[in-house]
Each structure stands twice: as C-alpha cells, then as structure tokens.
C-alpha cells in the first residue's frame, strides 16, 4: 500500500467567519451529489512545498462535506527524487542533459508505485510529474478507469524543455482531466477538452495564516534573534535556484545601503523530495557571509507554521523574488496578513500581486530593491497595499473556492463529460504589469460563482 498521510479534522463551517455562511451552505449543497464518493489525492511528500500545504486542508474539508477523501504519498529513494527534481527543473525551462538512466529510474518507480496502489476510488488526483507515470501501468492492467483520474500540474510548463515534455506528454494524456493553475500554463499540444483551470489557495484558519496577536509575534521574533523594532524584510521559500535566494541577499544589501537597520529573514523548509535544498542552502549561507542581520532559518531550527506566520506578519515588506513560479502560495500567505509583496513577475504571481495595488512586480535585483525601499519609506502606503492584498486573497485564493472547483470537476468526470474545458476565466489585463511576460498578464475574473 502507498503510505496514508494522517489528516486532522477540519470543518467548513468554521470558514463562515471568513467567506460568509451563505457560501459555506452553497458549497455543502454542491457536495451533496458526491456524498461518499471515494477520492484519493496522490503526491510525493507529506511535508514541504505548496502541494502538501494545500492537501493538508483540502483533504479534511472534502471529508467534512461528505466525500471520503484520502491522501497518500508515493515511494521514492534519492535517485528517484533527484530525477524528479531535474524533471521539475527541465519542465520549468532549465536545460538539463537527459540520460536513458534517468528515464529508467522514473519508469521503474512509476511501476513500483503502481504496484503499491490498492483500494477502490471514484476519483484519483495525481499531483505533479512525480506521480504522472502510475496511471499508464494501472490502466494497462485494466484495474482503474483512466477517465476518473486527474493529473494536477502545479508547474508553469510554458518554457518546458521539449525533449522532457515529449516524454511526459503520453503519460499525462491518459488522464481524464488535466488541471493547470492558469490558462497560460496550458500546453496547446494537449487535448484541451480535458483541461481545467483551478488556481491554488491558502487556508486562512491554519496555524500558518490565522491571526496572531502582536505579543505572540514579538515573542517568536525574539526567540530567533530578530529585532521587532527594526525594519524586517522576509522571503519564505525552499532553497531553490528558481526562488533566487542569492538575488534576495543582493536586494537586501542594496536596501541596507539606504536603511542600515534593516534585517533580512529567509525561511526555508527542507522537503524530502528536494535533494537540491542542502547544496543551495550552503551556497546561500556563503553568499550571506558573516552578516548578523541576515537570518537563515529552517524547519531544522524549529521554524514551523506559527513561526512562518509570525515572520510574514512582522515584515515591513515581503519579498518573493522568484525567477519561475507555479503559483507561489507564500505570496497569498503574506498578502492575507496585510503585508505588501514585492515579487518576480513570473508564473502565478501576477494573479496575486497586482502591480501598484497589492505590491509590486519586478524583474531584477535593482527593481526589487527600489520597490522595497519605496515601501520602507512610506509605511502607510505599504499598509494600504497590504490591506488591498488581503481583500484580493479573500476573494480569489482561499481554500473553500478550491474545494468548490474540485467538486465541480469531479461532477463533470462522473458525467463522463470530459469537457472540463478551460473554464470561466475571463481576463482583465489592464491591472497587471505589461512587459516582459505577455503570457502571464492575466487577472482572474473567474468564478462569478465565487461572488
Ligand atoms: N513553507 C514553509 N516553510 C518554509 C518554506 C516554505 O512552511 O520554510 C511553505 C510556505 O509557507 C508555502 C509552501 O511551503 O505554504 C510553499 O509553497 P509555494 O507555492 O510558495 O512554493 P513551492 O515550494 O511549492 O514551490
């Protein structure tokens, strides 16, 4: 059997205080036709990264509305996770030298995990490339209905290395539905009838996002030697080249020349499916040098959800200097705490950071430092942007909306209407940064049902 991830019970009713009781009732009604449906979410890790973060709330809320949802993780050893990380990098556009051995490793673990797959499910959602190969083995044996399987891709595939995507595509195509974060990520060489768009979301009531009082925040900061009275800029991200931790330090140094008191907090969790994390941590530490105002913190020092919550909340400005990004849950998390975000204009970030309204979109270290300095100079403008950010997230990026989207996807699959088609995402480009990312200039105006 694939390992079951233990789930904490959660109640959708508790979210009424954030999204309104009417909306809660509407979601419960939408779930009624799926009562007792057996749903499995499959991914590579129970901890670390955005997918685990979403499943930790999505699965319990599915259960709360009557769906029999489970979450299982696949097996893999270092060789497999090394290959899947290269896979991830190549799909995000990094040139990688592919070898037959890498493919073999991926196929071998896909088969092994297919052999460990057991149980009967009405719907299976396989997240990201790590799980994408299993269905091919299972459907070959005729033991599952591929039409009930969804591949949920959290990655921006627009610059995918062709050789790697060509290898992956036949595996992906077997799934009854293929879900992307935004329309711009959809590969045109897929069967578009089967494509659905579901942006990710955050849990406003989790320990990472729930309101904290300022005494609690101060206590946490002091525990890690961060001075709450001096300016703080923060990036929370895995140590990963795409998150540009070295660039973040360069930004901090430029900011420091204007604000000598500024402190930089970089929080990174080490995910077990991310073997690059350690070497990138070391590179970042070397780049930081002996500067005592740079705090490199991780789960290994006990920095968990409450601590991330406190650091995001205490920040004058939150940075997310990604060079590529699927969605960037950390952006929504910071905005939800009323903090402005200065972030790379990549992937799903422009859905969240509306340039000049909820933060600033940037394309270089210099831009990023200039915007951070601007916000440090005018704290009231920073607060105002943060407030707009919180409302933007409330409207579009909270978990109940994500739950609702999955429910409607399952209903479509149950009716055999593969026609998930790219759903109601209409576009308002005016608010969003113009260059140089024409493929990312879209603002959600979707889900009129979200009200
Ligand atoms: N995260 C965390 N601790 C860390 C680094 C990240 O809890 O030290 C969380 C972060 O708060 C967010 C998720 O991991 O919820 C990262 O998701 P995101 O979409 O930003 O990036 P990914 O890691 O999936 O590329």
Image (cartoon, grey):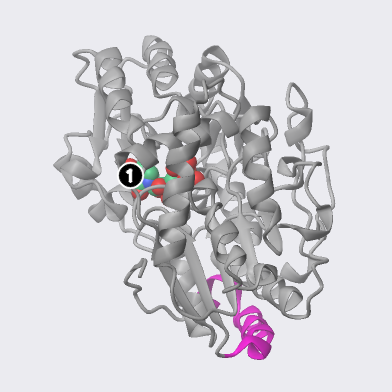
Q: Secondary structure at mark 1?
A: loop
Q: In what quadrant does ligand 1 lie?
A: top left
Q: Residue at x 48, y 59 (%)?
A: 54
Q: Is residue 256 above or below residue 188?
A: above
Q: Residue at x 34, y 61 (%)?
A: 207
Rendering coords of residue 224 (x, y %): 17, 38
Rendering coords of residue 429 (x, y %): 82, 39
The image quarter in which residue 112 lies: bottom left
How many badges with numbers are in the image? 1
Rendering coords of residue 241 (x, y %): 44, 25
Q: Is residue 405 above or below residue 93?
A: below
Q: Which residues are magenta?
A: 15-35
Rendering coords of residue 220 (x, y %): 21, 47
24 within the magenta span: yes
Q: Quadrant of the N terminus?
A: bottom left
Q: Is residue 298 above or below residue 260?
A: below
Tell me, yes or no, if residue 320 can be seen here: no
Q: Residue lying furthest front in this view?
A: 141
Q: Which residue is mark 1?
A: 271
Q: Residues within 10 Å of mark 1 (few under 14, many from 20)?
A: some
Of the pair 112 and 38, the residue shown nearer to us: 112
Query: What predominant SS class does the magenta segment belong to?
Result: helix
Is the CB of mark 1 within 8 Å of ligand 1? yes
Q: Residue at x 46, y 33 (%)?
A: 102
Q: Tell me if 16 is positioned left or right of 159 in this view.
A: left
Q: Quadrant of the C terminus?
A: bottom right
């Amino acid at each position: 059997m694939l390992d079951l991830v233990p789930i904490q019970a959660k109640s959708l009713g508790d979210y009424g205080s954030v999204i309104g009781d009417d909306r809660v009732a509407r979601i419960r009604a939408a779930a009624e036709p799926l009562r007792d449906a057996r749903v499995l979410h499959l991914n590579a890790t129970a901890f670390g990264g955005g997918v685990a973060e979403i499943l930790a709330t999505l699965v319990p809320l599915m259960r709360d509305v009557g769906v029999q949802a489970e979450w299982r993780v696949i097996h893999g050893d270092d060789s497999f996770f090394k290959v899947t990380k290269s896979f991830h990098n190549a799909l995000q556009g990094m040139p990688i030298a592919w070898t037959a051995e890498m493919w073999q490793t991926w196929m071998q673990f896909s088969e092994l995990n297919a052999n460990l797959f057991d149980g009967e499910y009405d719907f299976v959602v396989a997240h990201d490339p790590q799980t994408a190969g299993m269905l091919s083995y299972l459907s070959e044996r005729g033991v599952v209905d591929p039409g009930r399987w969804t591949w949920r891709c959290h990655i921006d595939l627009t610059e995918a290395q062709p050789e790697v995507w060509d290898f992956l595509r036949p595996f992906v195509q077997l799934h009854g539905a293929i879900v992307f974060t935004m329309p711009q990520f959809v590969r045109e060489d897929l069967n578009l009838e089967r494509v659905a768009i579901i942006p990710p979301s955050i849990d406003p009531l989790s320990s990472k996002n729930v309101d904290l009082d300022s005494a609690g925040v101060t206590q946490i900061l002091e525990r890690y030697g961060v001075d709450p009275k001096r300016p703080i800029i923060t990036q929370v991200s895995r140590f990963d080249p795409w998150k540009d931790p070295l660039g973040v330090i360069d930004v901090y140094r430029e900011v420091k020349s204007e604000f000598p008191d500024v402190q930089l907090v970089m929080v990174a969790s080490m995910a077990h499916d991310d073997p690059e994390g350690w070497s990138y941590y070391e590179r970042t530490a070397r780049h930081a040098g002996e500067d005592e105002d740079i705090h490199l913190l991780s789960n290994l020092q006990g920095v968990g959800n409450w601590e991330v919550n406190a650091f995001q909340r205490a920040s004058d400005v939150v940075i997310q200097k990604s060079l590529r990004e699927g969605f960037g849950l950390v952006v929504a998390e910071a905005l939800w705490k009323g903090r402005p975000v200065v972030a790379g204009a990549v992937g799903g970030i422009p859905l969240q950071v509306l340039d000049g309204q909820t933060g600033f979109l940037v394309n270089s270290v210099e831009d990023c430092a200039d915007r951070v300095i601007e916000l440090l100079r005018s704290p009231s403008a920073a607060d105002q942007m943060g407030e707009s950010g919180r409302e933007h997230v409330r409207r579009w990026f909270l978990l109940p909306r994500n739950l609702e989207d999955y429910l409607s996807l399952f209903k479509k699959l149950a009716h055999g209407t593969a026609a998930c088609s790219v759903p109601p995402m209409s576009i308002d480009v005016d608010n969003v940064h113009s260059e140089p990312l024409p493929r990312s200039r879209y603002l959600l105006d979707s889900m009129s049902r979200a009200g």
